[in-house]
């Protein structure tokens, strides 16, 4: 059985057998390491949890989110329609956490400030994370108070 056939078969086998096949794939195709690290970064690597002041269609608001890239890179992605309607005015906070800590911390902030959400016509990921700018001080205060509680949270998050 060739490596490709073994790979297909391994999808239905134990994690131990899958790891053996993955190891052989990496030995045969070392470039796979780059792709695996990219996926591992998404699920286990460092992420930035940010608060930014943006204008969407000329309206000032805050955006809370996380990204494994830079904040600027996150909003430079052209694959999302409506991206051109967002102008970053100021990065208010952008601190790094491990992936699980980042997603848990972002969730805490969104849950605490769910009543501050502003509906937009945007279709990009995170479209429901825009908040009324008049709550800026409260959002920053919770961010600054709670951030330290997530610096040691380590674990997996699902891939985007």
Image (cartoon, helix red, strand yellow):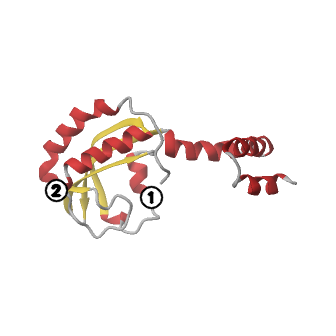
- Label 2 secondary element: helix
Q: Are marks 2 and 1 in contact (CB under 8 Å)?
A: no
Point out the residue furthest to the left here.
134
Q: Secondary structure at mark 1?
A: loop
Left or right relative to 24: residue 119: left
Whole-number angstrom distance, CA of label 2 to CA of label 1: 28 Å
The quarter of the picture where residue 105 lies is top left
Choose mark 2 or mark 1, whichever is in front.
2
Residue closest to the eye, 111 or 26:
111
Residue position marked by numbered label 1 in the rendering: 77
Q: Give the position of the N terminus as an image quadrant.
A: bottom right
Between 136 and 115, the one lying in front of the other is 115
Residue drawn at x 44%, y 34% as measured from the top left: 154
- Image mark for residue 19: none
Camera-side residue: 124 or 76? 124
Instruction: State whether residue 78 is above or below residue 160.
Output: below
The picture places residue 133, in percent across and down from the top left corner, at 16, 53
Q: Residue 108: which quarter of the image?
A: top left
How packed is label 1: few (under 14 Cα within 10 Å), some, or many (20 or more)? few
Q: How many marks?
A: 2
In the image, taking residue 70 as reference, residue 141 lies left or right, namely left
Query: Relative to 11, is 136 on the left or the right?
Result: left
Where residue 80 appears, as percent x and y from the top left, is 42, 65
Looking at marks 2 and 1 on the same chain, the residue that comes earlier in the sequence is marked by: 1
Does 67 appear above or below 79?
above
Q: Residues within 10 Å of mark 2 (few under 14, many from 20)?
A: few
Tell me, for residue 115, which label it has, or none: 2
Which residue ends up furthest to the right in the rendered image?
A: 1
Residue 120: percent from left, percent from top? 25, 67
Q: Position of residue 116 (x, y in %)?
A: 17, 55
């Amino acid at each position: 059985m060739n490596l490709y056939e073994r790979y297909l078969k391994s999808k239905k086998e134990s994690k131990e057998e899958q790891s053996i096949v993955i190891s052989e794939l990496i030995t045969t195709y070392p470039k796979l390491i780059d792709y695996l690290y990219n996926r591992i970064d998404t699920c286990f690597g460092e992420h930035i949890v940010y608060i930014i002041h943006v204008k969407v269609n000329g309206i000032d608001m805050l955006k809370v989110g996380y990204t494994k890239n830079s904040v600027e890179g996150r909003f430079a992605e052209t694959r999302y329609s409506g991206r051109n309607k967002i102008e970053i005015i100021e990065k208010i906070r952008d601190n790094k956490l491990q992936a699980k800590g980042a997603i848990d911390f972002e969730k805490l902030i969104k849950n605490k400030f769910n009543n501050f959400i502003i509906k937009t016509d945007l279709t990009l990921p995170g479209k429901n994370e825009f908040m009324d700018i008049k709550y800026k001080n409260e959002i920053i205060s919770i961010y600054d108070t709670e951030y330290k509680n997530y610096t040691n949270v380590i674990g997996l998050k699902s891939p985007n």
